[in-house]
Image (spheres, rainbow, N blue to C red):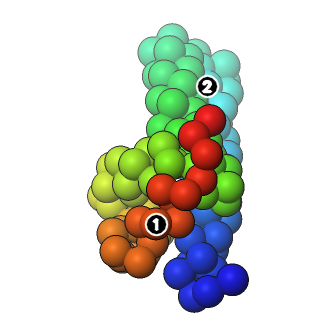
Amino acid sequence: MNAVQKHVRILAVCLVVYSCLFAMIGVILGLWGIFFGGLLMGDRNAIPGGTFLIVLVLILSVPGVIAGIGMSKFRRWSRIAALVFLVLHLIVFPFGTVLGIYGLAVLLNPRAWPLFESAAPV
């Protein structure tokens, strides 16, 4: 395994871990808002707000897990999916920004492109 392959695999693991942590933190914050705001304080607006946060965070996290798993297998579609995911998460300072910069450096490296071209599409 050459250096570029190692970086792609490291990025794949980082994408899955980051996406799972992002989802977990968002779900915890949403449940916290629902429980404390909605149930304890009686604020009826907290329940839909917390539910919306949970759904939004899951929608934003699942593509990262899928792209990370596809990248670990060097699937052609996973490179584009990861690039879109990473660009969108550049604004999530500091971890999304760091991961986004590293991911863009790895995936836009011309030596990484052949790795994804040789894999059979699924």
Residue 37 seen anywhere in this rendered image of the structure = no
Q: Nearer the viewer, residue 85 or 47?
A: 85
Q: Nearer the viewer, residue 14 or 22?
A: 14
Residue sitting at 45 percent across and 72 percent down?
112
Quarter of the picture holding the C terminus = top right
In the image, residue 10 lies at what x, y percent? 63, 74
- Mark 1 = which residue? 114
Camera-nearest label, 1 or 2: 1
In the rendered view, would you say 104 is above or below 57?
below
Quarter of the picture holding the N terminus = bottom right
The Cα atoms of the two marked residues, 1 and 2, are separated by 47 Å
Residue type marked 1 = Pro
Q: Which mark is residue 34?
A: 2
Residue 106 seen anywhere in this rendered image of the structure = yes
The kind of secondary structure element at disc 1 is helix
Q: Which mark is residue 65?
A: none
Tell me which corner region of the image, top left, top right, bottom left or bottom right, holds residue 39: top right
In the rendered view, would you say 68 is above or below 39?
below
